[in-house]
Image (cartoon, rainbow, N blue to C red):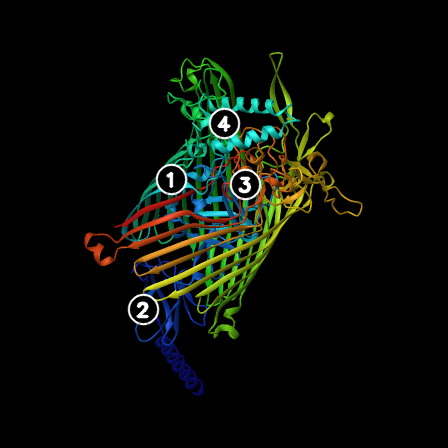
């Protein structure tokens, strides 16, 4: 009986327990949307204090079992967290507000995305707003001054000019130094295929209006996922996509006028005659027997230069500089259409750019089209396609070292007429008249580019996806160079050069990704996959001459085919990669990645390399002792270490190569390159430590970073003994380092309803030093640059100019021989052969940065960016002709007339004018200038017409704006511009180089 009572009592207790349990827990559901009412898929929903959780489906719906009194926490990248307390209701629809905190910003990283708040890498993100409406022909120029530790310099002011981008300094001497560009997951072909001696920008084909964001991976932890191609940094470009909701149509039109940022002062005809007459007289005793013969000679030269005009009475005063430059323009027209529904999103865009350069004969015409589509087949299966086409048509001029390039016209004396009386260009000038080239020749380059990508992902289990990509990148370039019979240096009745290059890049990748929030405290992310990248290239060219007339301007019109060439090459990369990220309570952050690359470019013994990376972070502000701080809103410490490689060395440096030869009209082969089976990539090991901070709820935020990059296995051509049959062999010998600091400060200075003002400042310091070189650290000298242990890469190496002897007007040089005590002999000599060259400067800046301000007042917006560079120098390779104390008949800079030495006691840096005297004209620091500068890089002022006016006409936005580029430059540099460099060789050198353009534009942006 007792047992029955006990069993009955236990049964009643169990039923009551179940009853109360079911009464306390219930299924709650709802829909999660953004502030525009659009559903948000993938929102994490957890019960606070437990590990129970779920995610919203594609339509934003969710359901979860929870008890009354429990709290649901809704979290989603880019949105503010929301909390809901369960009451008697079973339906809870949640609207999530977009986060204004940049810490919640989502960044694109290799093979995925990550929140800025939990990032342990050093990545800088630039949005479409940073590059919109800047009237430049390439998107890279719009980034200048906006990314800490990233130096961006266009070679010169030509519309197609090549670009140099250095992320935390130069990491190589002989291999490539440019970052890897990845467009929507496609590693882009980025080789310079120019044949006229001046580089072009292969990425000129990308239109800024297509770009949604640009992430620059700076440290090894972020770039190591790209392995053997990440040593110079990685630039990830993400194009725009459609968003669910109402379709949007946008049109942007702008037109602007351009001029050089600077012009220089040259001698007028009268000044030229006076200076060169004096120079001839000063040459009596060296070049002339007496004053009479000197005057007779110089006046005869004036007669020739004046081409029959009356130079004695100033009949001609040609401004050759004004002839070389022209008023340029930039016209942009682009449109885009985007939208989508719950299943499909789309983005279509097209753009047209026409740029007339500031130097004659230089123009660009480019059009782009893009289609981006994604479709959701089910809650688990998504596919998409990106496809773009561009065509860039460039009218080019000769490289800076060619006599016929327009800016070399500044060497012509003003007494020489540009045209004859009949209007034809004057051919009787001291140097070839570029106007003859302009009228009788052309150089046209057309670049066609196709980028395509198909991709898909399938969610196998909650949080576990398989991802697949196939991408194709086609770079097809043709060049046509016609030189007519009346062009300078033409003696073969005309000549035509035609070339074509076809480079195809295939990428196939597949990877698994797992992203899961495990309760309130743990977040895990895993990626593992493989990738194959194959590039093929085919090049052909042909040259013909002897044309019946200049009306025939293609190869088939020539009677004689005088040259031809062709080659094919290929390379491939096969990779395995993996990455893991872990976040505990948004406080303790860990990341590890590894990539194994195999490349056909390297030796059989060293074909594969492994590139690991590790990083960690601690969000101190999430600790209990700082959570309640009213001042410090965010504080994170992070550190990283990793290895990356540089495979940008060409396709066959490790192989034995043989070439076809002809001997006595019989075919044969010969060794053209010895092989090295142990050749491998240059490896960069980088360590980074950073602090991220925020004050006053994020109104003030910033970062401070220290980095150290060590690159070993530098690639050099090591000399071989003559009996080996080859002169040198490629080997991994050498080491260099870069180390420095970066500082970023962002501030929302004023944030009121009618007025907002924010500013962003960045600065970087980089020290570059060579640690070892081949052949027992022997110096490697190339022109005016040297590779020397203990010095920066490509340091300037030349005679040190000591000014002018006030007694006799001689140009002087410091002897700089080494004394017995190790000091330098600072005595002077007027003979450069008695002096010694020394290291005198750095072609790369030590400090660089920028500051951007954005101001909004009611419907008026203003933004402007200043950039600055400090600590570098430029060598003016043309200085020994342009500022040469009237040594030869080139026109001279004005200071050679106004500041010249004329009598004993004169204190000046300009030696006495001496025709043919070579007085102070050796390649020395006389022509080396510091090029520190601060520049107002761009500024935009806009006005948005109020909504209440435009909505009645069906518009959602109408904005008019004016914008300018390179508006103001503050510098002591005496050349054309501190950012103008030679495109014909020489690191850090200018040589009749075109300055950048100053552009003023007016634009209209309309959205429907």
**Can residue 384 be spotted in the picture?**
no
Q: CA distance from mark 1 to mark 2?
A: 43 Å
Tell me the residue that label 4 is attached to: 539
Q: Nearer the viewer, residue 874 or 236?
A: 874
First in sequence: mark 3 vs mark 4: 4
Task: Residue 757: give x, y in percent of width and height.
Answer: 39, 62
Compared across the picture, whether 955 is left or right of 746 comes to: left
**Can residue 527 be spotted in the picture?**
yes
Q: What label does residue 574 carry, if any?
A: 3
First in sequence: mark 4 vs mark 2: 2
Q: What label does residue 92 carry, if any?
A: 2
Task: Residue 347: give x, y in percent of width and height.
Answer: 33, 46
Tell me the residue that label 1 is attached to: 388
Q: Residue at x 27, y 50 (%)?
A: 247
Q: Nearer the viewer, residue 381 or 659?
A: 659
First in sequence: mark 1 vs mark 2: 2
């Amino acid at each position: 009986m007792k047992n029955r009572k006990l069993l009955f009592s236990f049964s009643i207790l169990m039923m009551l327990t179940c009853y109360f349990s079911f009464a306390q827990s219930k299924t709650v559901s709802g829909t999660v949307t953004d502030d525009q009412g659009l559903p948000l898929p993938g929102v994490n929903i957890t019960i606070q204090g437990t590990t129970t959780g779920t995610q919203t489906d594609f339509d934003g719906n969710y359901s979860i079992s929870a008890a009354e009194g429990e709290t649901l926490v809704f979290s989603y990248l880019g949105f503010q967290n929301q909390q809901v307390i369960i009451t008697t209701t079973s339906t809870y629809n949640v609207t999530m507000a977009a986060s204004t905190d940049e810490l919640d910003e989502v960044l694109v990283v290799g093979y995925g995305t990550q929140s800025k708040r939990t990032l342990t890498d050093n990545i800088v993100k630039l949005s479409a707003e940073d590059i919109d409406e800047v009237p430049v022909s390439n998107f890279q120029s719009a980034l200048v001054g906006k990314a800490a530790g990233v130096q961006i310099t266009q070679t010169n002011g030509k519309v197609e000019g090549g670009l140099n981008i250095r992320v935390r300094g130069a990491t190589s001497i002989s291999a490539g130094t440019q970052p890897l560009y990845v467009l929507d997951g496609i590693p882009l072909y980025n080789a310079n295929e120019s044949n006229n001696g001046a580089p072009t920008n292969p990425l000129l084909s990308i239109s800024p209006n297509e770009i949604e964001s640009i992430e620059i991976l700076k440290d090894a932890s972020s770039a190591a996922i790209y392995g053997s191609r990440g040593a110079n940094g990685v630039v990830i470009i993400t194009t725009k996509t459609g968003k669910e909701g109402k379709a949007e149509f946008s049109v942007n039109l702008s037109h602007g006028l351009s001029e050089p940022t600077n012009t220089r002062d040259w001698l007028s005809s009268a000044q030229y005659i006076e200076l060169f007459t004096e120079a001839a007289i000063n040459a009596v005793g060296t070049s002339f027997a007496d004053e009479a013969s000197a005057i007779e000679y110089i006046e005869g030269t004036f007669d020739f230069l004046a081409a029959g005009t009356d130079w004695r009475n100033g009949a001609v005063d040609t401004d050759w500089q004004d002839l070389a430059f022209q008023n340029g323009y930039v016209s942009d027209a682009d449109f885009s259409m985007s939208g989508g529904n719950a299943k499909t999103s789309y983005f279509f865009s097209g753009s047209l750019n026409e740029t007339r350069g500031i130097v004659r004969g230089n123009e660009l015409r480019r059009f782009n089209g893009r289609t981006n589509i994604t479709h959701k087949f089910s809650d688990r299966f998504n596919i998409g396609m990106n496809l773009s086409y561009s065509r860039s048509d460039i009218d080019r001029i000769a490289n800076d070292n060619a006599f016929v390039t327009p800016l070399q016209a500044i060497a012509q004396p003003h007494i020489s007429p540009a045209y004859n009386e009949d209007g034809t260009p004057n051919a009787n000038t001291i140097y070839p008249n570029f106007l003859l080239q302009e009228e009788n020749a052309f150089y046209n380059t057309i670049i066609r580019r196709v980028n395509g990508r198909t991709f898909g992902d399938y969610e196998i289990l909650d949080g576990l996806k398989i991802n697949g990509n196939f991408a194709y990148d086609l770079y097809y370039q043709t060049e046509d160079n016609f030189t007519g019979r009346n062009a300078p240096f033409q003696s073969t009745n005309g000549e035509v050069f035609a070339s074509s290059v076809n480079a195809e890049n295939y990428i196939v990748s597949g990877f698994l990704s797992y992203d899961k929030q495990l309760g309130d405290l743990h977040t895990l992310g895993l990626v593992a996959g493989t990738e194959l990248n194959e590039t093929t290239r085919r090049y052909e060219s042909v040259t013909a001459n002897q044309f019946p007339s200049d009306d025939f301007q293609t190869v088939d019109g020539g009677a004689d085919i005088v040259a031809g060439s062709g080659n094919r090459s290929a390379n491939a990369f096969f990779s395995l990669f993996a990455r893991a990220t872990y976040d505990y309570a948004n406080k303790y952050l860990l990341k590890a990645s590894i990539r194994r690359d195999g490349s056909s470019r390297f030796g059989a013994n060293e074909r594969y390399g492994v590139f690991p990376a590790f990083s960690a972070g601690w969000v101190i502000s999430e600790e209990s002792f700082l959570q309640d701080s009213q001042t410090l809103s965010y504080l994170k410490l992070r550190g990283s270490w990793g290895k990356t490689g540089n495979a940008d060395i060409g396709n066959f440096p490790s192989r034995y190569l043989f070439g076809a030869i002809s001997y006595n009209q019989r075919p044969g082969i010969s060794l053209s390159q010895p092989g090295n089976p142990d050749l491998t990539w240059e490896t960069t090991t980088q360590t980074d430590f950073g602090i991220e901070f925020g004050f006053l709820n994020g109104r003030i935020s910033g970062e401070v970073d220290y980095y150290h990059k060590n690159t070993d296995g530098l690639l050099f051509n090591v000399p071989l003994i003559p009996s080996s049959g080859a002169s040198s062999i490629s080997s991994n010998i050498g080491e260099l380092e870069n180390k420095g600091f970066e500082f970023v400060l962002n501030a929302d200075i004023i944030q009121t309803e009618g007025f907002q003002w924010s500013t962003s400042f960045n600065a970087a310091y980089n020290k570059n030093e060579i640690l070892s070189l081949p052949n027992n650290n022997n110096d490697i000298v190339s022109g005016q640059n040297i590779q020397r242990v203990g010095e920066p890469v490509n340091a300037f190496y030349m005679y040190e100019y000591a000014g002018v002897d006030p007694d006799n007007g001689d140009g002087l040089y410091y002897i700089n021989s080494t004394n017995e005590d190790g000091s330098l002999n600072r005595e002077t000599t007027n003979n450069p052969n008695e002096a010694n060259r020394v290291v005198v400067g750095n072609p790369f800046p030590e400090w660089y940065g920028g500051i951007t301000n954005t101001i909004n007042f009611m419907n008026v917006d203003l933004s402007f960016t200043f950039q600055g560079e400090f600590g570098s120098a430029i060598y003016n390779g043309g200085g020994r002709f342009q500022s040469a104390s009237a040594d030869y008949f080139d026109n001279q800079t004005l200071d050679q007339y106004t500041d010249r030495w004329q009598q004993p006691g004169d204190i000046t840096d300009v030696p006495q004018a001496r025709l043919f005297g070579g007085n102070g004209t050796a390649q020395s620091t006389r022509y080396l200038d510091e090029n520190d500068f601060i520049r107002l890089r761009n500024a935009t002022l806009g006005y948005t017409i109020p909504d209440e006016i435009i909505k009645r006409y069906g518009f959602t936005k109408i904005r008019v704006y004016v914008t300018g580029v390179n508006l103001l430059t503050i510098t002591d540099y005496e050349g054309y511009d501190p950012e103008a460099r030679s495109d014909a060789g020489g690191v850090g050198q200018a040589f009749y180089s075109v300055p950048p353009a100053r552009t003023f534009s007016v634009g209209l942006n309309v959205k429907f």
